[in-house]
Image (cartoon, rainbow, N blue to C red):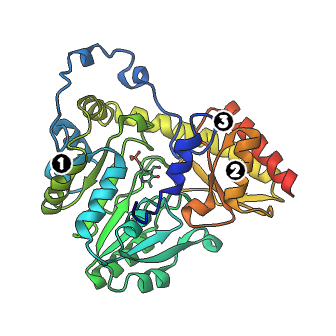
Amino acid sequence: MNDFQPFLLERMMSAFEQDVEINLSESGVHPMTLGELTGGDATSLLATELNYPHVNGDPELRENIAAMYEGARPENVLVTVGAIEANYLSINTVLSGSDRIATMMPNYLQIWGIAKNFGRDIREFRLDPERGWALDVPGLREAAEGAKLIAVCHPNNPTGHALSEDEIAALVGVAEENGSWLISDEVYSGAERVGEKSTPSLYGRYDKMIAVGSMSKAYGLPGLRVGWVVAQEDLIDEIWARHEYVAISATMLSNKLAALALSPDVRPRIIERTRGLIRRGFPVLEKWAKDNSDIVSITPPDAGAIGFVKYAANIGSEAFVEKLRSEQSVLIAPGAHFGAEGFVRISFGLPEDYLSEGLRRIGDTFREIG
Ligand SMILES: Cc1ncc(COP(=O)(O)O)c(C=O)c1O
C-alpha cells in the first residue's frame, strides 16, 4: 500500500451516517424523492433505454447547465459523476509533478487531499473567523505566488461564506498576476439563506477559470450522482479524455432526471424548496446557539445548509464528535476535518423536530464536558 491521505470527512460519514438515529453531518438539504422530482408521474421514464448516455453528458442537460453560466455554451460543459469527479479530474488535468496549488482553508478537503496524494506543493490561505470569514487577501497573495492552480470553494463549505465582489476582484487579480488556473467549487450556489439571487459564479470573470457544480446540494438530489465542470472548450476536452478512464459517464437515468430538474419549469420549484428548508432550519440553529451562547457561537452562512459552530468546551472536535455519536447516536462533522479546530459543522436544512432533537443532544453533550 502506498502512503495515502484518506478523505477523513467522507471516511467518517460512510462508516456511520447510515446507523445513527440523527444525522446532522450532511451538507445538503433533506433530499427530494423521485415522486417529488417528477411531480408524481414517472411513467415517461419507463421507456428510457438503460444504455450508456452521451459520455460527456445528455445534450439537454448540458444545455440547461450552460444556461446557468453567463457566456457558456454546451461545449463548455462536461457532466461528471458528482462534483467529486469534476474536482478530481479538473485538478489532475491542470497539475502535474510537484506543481504548486494554493487552496482555501477552512474547506471541504477533497482537493487538498488529492493534491497531497499526488505530491503537489500545497500552500494554504484562509478565511478569517475574526472578520466573519472574510478572505485573507495578503495570505492569498503569498500562497499563490508561483501557483499553477488556485482553488476556492464559493460559497464555502464549511463556513457558508460567499466571496464578495471585492474579494472576487482580488482573487482574479492574484490569479492573473501568477498566470494561475482558478477552480471554484460552487456546489452551494442556489442554496442562499437570504435574498432571491444565486451566488454569482466566477465563470466568465477570468479566462483560465474552472467552475464546478452539482445536483447534490442546492437541488437536494445527491443520489443522482451528477455534477459538472464548466470551462474553456479545450480544457473540457482534456478533462473529458480523463473522465473516460474513471467513470465513462454518469448513468442514463441520472442524466435524464438531472435534465428535468434543471429545466426552466422545474428548477425554480426545486430552488424554492431548498431555500425553504434552509430558511426554516437556520432560525432553529440560531435560537439554539443563542440559548447556549456560553458555549457556542455561529457566524450566519451566506449559503448552504450547514452551520460552522465555534465552541468553548475543553475537547478536540474529533473527540467530541465521537463522544456524541457513541453516546447520543447523533452524527455531526468535526472542524478538524475542514482544517479548523474548535468548531463543529452542523447540518440544518432538515425537518424541524429532527433537527431540534439533534441540537438538544449536542447541547447536553457540550454541557456535560463543561
Ligand atoms: C464543496 C463540495 N464539493 C463537492 C462535494 C461532493 O459533491 P457531489 O455529491 O456532487 O459529488 C461536496 C459534498 O459535500 C462539497 O461539499
Tally of numbered tags: 3
Q: For disc 3, does the CB lie below 8 Å from ligand 1? A: no
Report the mark closest to the observer, 2 or 3. Answer: 2
Q: Residue at x 25, y 72 (%)?
A: 96
Query: Regarding mark 2 in the picture, which secondary structure is present there?
Result: helix
Question: Is residue 194 at least partly visible in the picture?
Answer: no
What is the distance, in whole Å, between disc 1 and disc 2 at their CAs?
39 Å
Q: Residues within 10 Å of mark 2 (few under 14, many from 20)?
A: some
Tag in front: 3 or 1: 1
| Quarter of the image where one finds residue 76 | bottom left
- Crowding at dot 3, Cα within 10 Å, few <14 / some 14-19 / many 20+, comes out as many
* Amino acid residing under circle 3: Ile
> Circle 1 — which element?
helix
Q: Earlier in the sequence, mark 1 or mark 2?
A: 1
- Estimate the x, y position of residue 205 in percent, counting from the top left: 28, 68
Which residue does the numbered mark 1 point to in the structure image? 244
- Check mark 1 vs ligand 1: CB closer than 8 Å? yes or no: no
Asked if residue 110 lies left or right of residue 301, the reply is: left
Residue drawn at the location 72% of the way across and 63% of the way down: 316
Task: Give the quarter of the figure containing the N terminus.
Answer: bottom left
User: Which residue matches tag 2?
Assistant: 322
Image position, residue 283 (x, y; %): 68, 45
Dot 3 falls on a residue whose secondary structure is strand
Query: To which residue does mark 3 refer?
Result: 22
Viewer-proximal residue, 38 or 83? Answer: 83
Alpha carbon of mark 3 to alpha carbon of mark 1: how far? 38 Å
Answer above or below: position of 180 versus 19: below
